[in-house]
Amino acid sequence: MNSNAPDVVDAPKDAARAAATHLPYRRDIDGLRAIAVLSVILFHAFPALLPGGFIGVDIFFVISGYLISGILLRELQLGKFSIAAFYARRVKRIFPSLLAVMIACLVFGWLALFPDEYGQLGKHVGGGASFAANFFYWAQVGYFDTSADTKPLLHLWSLGIEEQFYIVWPAVLALAWRWRSKLLLVTALLALLSFALNAAGISHHATATFYSPLSRAWELLGGALLACVAHGRPSAAPGGFKAHLMASAALALLALGLALITPKHFPGWWALMPVAAAMLLIEAGPQAWFNRFVLGNPVMVWIGLISYPLYLWHWPLLSFAQIVEGHLPAPQIRAAALVAAVLLAWLSWRLLERPLRGLRGARARAAVTLLCVLMAGTGLAGGYVFWQQGLPQRAAIQENLANQKALVLVEDKANAAACKQRYGFDSVYKYCLQAWPEREPTVALLGDSHAYHVVAGLTNYYKSKGENLLMLGTRVPYWDLPAGADDEFQKATQPMLEQALNTPSIKTVIFATHQRVGFADNFKPMVNAARDTYRRFLAAGKRVIVIEDVPILPFDPRTCIRRPGVASSATTSPCGIPRSEWDKQVDQHEQIRQETARMFPQVEWFRASSALCDERWCSAMIDGRLMYRDTNHLSYDGDLRVGSWFSRWAEQQPPAARPGGNP
């Protein structure tokens, strides 16, 4: 994200007051900022209109590298280079609007976000305040993943990369200045090295390549190359036909990039298009026709001047709208968010940035100190919110607190550790829970996360019968399914199946998985694997029970909970889906299940959906309590409800089939 506007004067009338180290003002660069920020915010609000709009960030990187490097070179030439002064300027430029946005996010979150959401926001405020957001998101989520829409400060990754670059670059430039004849060579070599990391890493380490400052530095260094060329050039930038040709080529590259570039394999080689376009437009100079009449247009210049706060404000507004709505907001809501972002950006620029920019001497030093203290305090506040798990004691969200807790996955870590130690499971791919880890198991529950989300209810039932349930976590719990090269969980599945098969004390085996055989991409191997698995366990004398899955919701269940801090917060009502929709979800699966049941009459089938569905409706909230924690996983309350229905079902089975029944 480009954030270097204070280092150039705002308009030609201010040029006389600019310090000797300031670069001559160029209206077209502000116009280029406008293109960059408009591309990004349109992509975020209406991605179908501008599929490649995210490349605006790459344009910002080039502009930043050009202007900042130009200023540093001018200071070096005049003997006025100062690292302290450089960072003081950065603080005055970056901190005011960034603080306003992060504080506003914390305030809104206090009023409207549930504890898990607010805790995550606090963590990201800490990342933003420390300019390490890119590392936080590197470890969490891809920039283009669906869950990224509910991270209000995700866009600060680019600011992190930029500021990490400027921790190193001024010192490198100052050292390279001693060998002025090698200045351009040093910059070019560093840019090539960074680009090589980018090109080499994109195929196998896409997320790391996207977020790493090492693989994105070449974009800022592209701008720095232009600054080095301009600094060593005795004459003005190319004009006339050559400038127009550069601008035309840049315009073509930019248009192609916005239309053709997709998130897949980006940045990689594709990033050359926006970077080259930005470099060509800057090098073309202010007299090129496109730069003069389009980029230099007063409207474009005005947007460019507020581009930094506009970038900061737009994404939290869109993200909070997504969080409150529980789905992609209506177009009019997204459009209103962009209008609000423009207004807030102008206010931030007019009331915060411009007044601070003009401070000099002791007042400037005091302002810088205060801004640093406020930034540290905001980061600590975010860290405290995260540490306190989203402050669930907030009065604003006390209503429906139990349902808010239902949205959070709870794990019995002590039980899992004891179980894994008992069975010698030494990797994250081998997971288990056991009612009494010190005893031999008598019942095995095999499956993925859709086995985990019924384990509490089943454990309660079997414990009441004196049975010891062992849950073995797998991927799809069937024999001989092919595992992809990176699917370590599926590779660990067969040993889990063998553990259950070869443990004499286990008399009952229960299967539960999200994978409905009728929905598999190539369901015949899935069906054959399931039937072979049932056959093996039946042949070993085990009782086989299959838990059929619960309905998938077309909405986030958190939208069933009203947010007291948001007057416009609407809840999904009624909170569920028609029974007919659920029947459609399992139509093909049910046909195959019936065929399998005819082949294996000994296999018993429990429909978990019976705990949630009647003849007309499948409910995601029952008696005021949420049954789901996301679109397809049960909450703890849902888990217990399914367990209760399972116990009724089990007690209706023939006596020999019940726990403790006579064979």
Image: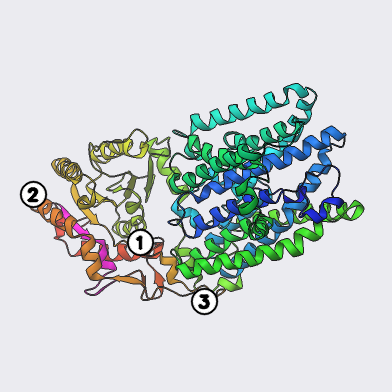
Looking at numbered disc 3 in the image, what kind of residue is underneath it?
A: Ser
Secondary structure beneath disc 1?
helix
Q: Residue at x 26, y 70 (%)?
A: 613
Query: In the image, which disc is placed on residue 371?
Result: none
> Which residue was labeled with disc 1?
639
Q: CA distance from mark 1 to mark 3?
A: 32 Å
Q: Foreground residue, 661 or 536?
A: 536
Q: CA distance from mark 2 to mark 1?
A: 30 Å
Residue 360 placement, left or right of 372: right
Badge 2 density bin: few <14, some 14–19, many ≥20, Cα 10 Å: few
Q: Is 430 contained in the magenta span?
A: no
Up the image or down, 404 lies above or below 541; here it is: below
Secondary structure beneath disc 2?
helix
Residue 544 placement, left or right of 489: left
Disc 1 or 3, which lies upstream in sequence?
3
Q: Residue at x 52, y 67 (%)?
A: 335
Residue closest to the far bottom: 567
Q: Foreground residue, 510 or 450?
A: 450
> Which residue was labeled with disc 3?
568
Disc 2 or 1, which lies upstream in sequence?
2
Looking at numbered disc 1 in the image, what kind of residue is underneath it?
A: Asp
Can you give x and y, in whole percent of width and height, for residue 432 in the image?
37, 45
